[in-house]
Image (spheres, helix red, strand yellow):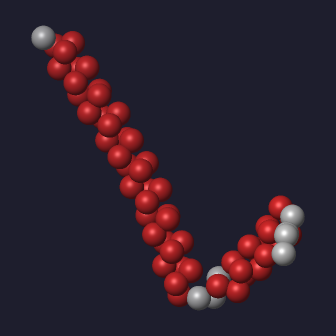
Amino acid sequence: MKIGRLGEMKVWLGEIKKIRNDDHFNAMFAKIFIEIIVNILRSQRHCVQQMITETIVYNE
């Protein structure tokens, strides 16, 4: 059974609608959301560390 790309998307969206009310889906969504936030914080921390390093080098 071959489904085109559009059909695949429709099936996928149908699955999401089905499990949207499910707790597992909510937990999965929260996990992804937390990972995104953690990555943003990590990149910000890296910028701060770089600024501190540059300041130390500048002061020497």
Q: Choose between 20 and 41: the one closer to the eye.
A: 20
- Which quadrant would the C terminus be assigned to in this image? top left
Residue sitting at x 43%, y 64% = 34
Residue ID at (47%, 56%): 36
Q: Where is residue 31 in the image (x, y as percent from the top left)?
A: 45, 69
Q: Which residue is drawn at 65% across and 82% down?
A: 20
- Pinpoint residue 52: horizontal percent, then vertical percent: 23, 28
Examine the image and state in which quarter residue 51 appears: top left
- Residue visible at 85% across and 70% down? 2
The spot of residue 59 in percent (x, y) is 16, 13
Up-down relation of residue 53 to residue 47 (above or below): above
**38 left or right of 22?**
left
Q: Nearer the viewer, residue 59 or 25?
A: 25
8 left or right of 56 in image: right
> For the view shown, which residue lies furthest in the front direction?
1
- Residue 4 appears in which quarter of the rendering? bottom right
Q: Which one is in front, 2 or 54?
A: 2
In this rendering, would 13 be left or right of 47?
right
Along the horizontal axis of the image, is 25 left or right of 19?
A: left
Instruction: Indicate whether 33 appears above or below 12.
Output: above
Q: Quadrant of the N terminus?
A: bottom right
